[in-house]
Structures are given as C-alpha cells and as structure tokens.
Amino acid sequence: MKTTGIMIVGVGGQGSLLASKLLGSLLLDRGYDVKVSEVHGMSQRGGSVVTYVKFGEKVYSPIITEGEADYILSFEKLEAARYAACLKKGGRIIVNTQEIDPMPVLIGGATYPTDILDELTEKGLDIDALDALSVACEAGSPKAVNIVLLSRLAKLLDIPYEAWLAAIERSVKPRFVELNKKAFALGYNK
C-alpha cells in the first residue's frame, strides 16, 4: 500500500485544523497508519496555516515537501499558489475560489493577483476549483467551507460516503452535525 500525502492549507480561522483532525480520525478508523502535523504560523492573525496528513500501511513522518503531495486542499486561492510546488506530478489541488486579502494587500503594499487559477492551470496542474463559501452558506453556515472541501476530497479517496458522515458525527459538536452533513452532501454532489 502506497503512502498518500495531503496538505490542507488556508488562512487562520477557516477551519483547516478541524478538517485535518476529522480526516485523521477517519483514516485511523479505516485501519491506516496516519501521521498529522500542524504548522500554525500567525493563524490567529489571519496568517497561513498548513496541515500535513499522511496515511498508508506504515508512515514515518507527516511532513510533505516539494513534489510530494498527492492532494492539496486549499481554503483560499493565494494559498493554493503558495503551496503548489508541493504537489506531485499527477496530483490534484482542490481550491476554494474565495479571496482573503493578506496583510500586504490590506495595508496597500500589494494587490491581490487576479489570475492565480489560470496560472496554475497553465503550469499543467489538475485544479478542482469551486466556490466552497457559497456552498457552505447554502448549507447554512460560512464556517462549513472545510467540510465542503473535504467532500471534494472524498470523491477521490476509496472510502465509503457513510464513513465520512460518521467521521463528521464524531468530530463536530452535536448541534452542528446536520448542517455539516448537508454541507458535505452539497459539496460532494456539485
């Protein structure tokens, strides 16, 4: 069994840490050896957040370096560009089309790039771009972006749909379970 590497990248406060914990829990339940590592950076101030999740028969380190990620879940377009070099040939980036201005843009020192996804596609990268924020809002909360993105990953992994729903039930507070299941279904079926 090969080892699979997934990077979850975003901006602090978007729910990427919950996504990595849910994914790790799901993979452990499926019998995989799983390693998860979180790099917070300035997450509480809107800075970049990166989580590595590796799973397989035996995993020795969670760290993913350039050219090693099978999948990248990006909660924001600029973060997709920042970590695209980590994607291995034949890998896929699942990206939320949301734009969150980084500090240099907020203070007027830079402008947000307008053609990020086009540039990534021109480099030959496999991009699954969707407006996960709109899907999450349709489900009932903008905070469900993480679950929408996980639903797109679910379509690529050989794990039954019901196992994902069970992981949601275990990982989120009971009052948010149905909302998150709805977000998962909406994202999965887009």
Image (tube, rainbow, N blue to C red):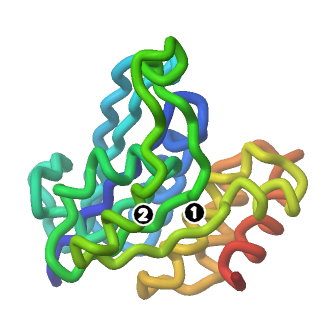
Q: Residue at x 59, y 76 (%)?
A: 163
Residue 161: name its quadrant.
bottom right
Q: Residue at x 21, y 82 (%)?
A: 90
Q: Residue at x 59, y 30 (%)?
A: 13
The 10 Å Cα crowd at callout 2, few under 14, some 14 to 19, many 20 or more, is many
- Is residue 175 shown above or below 86? above
What residue does disc 1 label? 149
Numbered disc 1: secondary structure: helix
Residue 77 x/y as whole percent: 47, 51
Please tell me whether mark 2 or mark 1 is closer to you in this view.
2
Screen quadrant of the C terminus: bottom right
Numbered disc 2: secondary structure: helix
- Is residue 102 shown above or below 143? above
Residue 64 x/y as whole percent: 16, 52
The 10 Å Cα crowd at callout 1, few under 14, some 14 to 19, many 20 or more, is many
Judging depth in this view, the residue of 182 and 60 nearest the camera is 182
Query: Residue 114 vs residue 59: left or right?
Result: right
Residue 100: name its quadrant.
top right
Query: Residue 46 vs residue 56: left or right?
Result: right
Judging depth in this view, the residue of 91 and 2 nearest the camera is 91
Residue 76 x/y as whole percent: 51, 48
Q: Amino acid at mark 2?
A: Leu
What residue does disc 2 label? 117
Query: Residue 189 vs residue 121: left or right?
Result: right
User: Mark 2 to mark 1: distance in Å?
Assistant: 16 Å
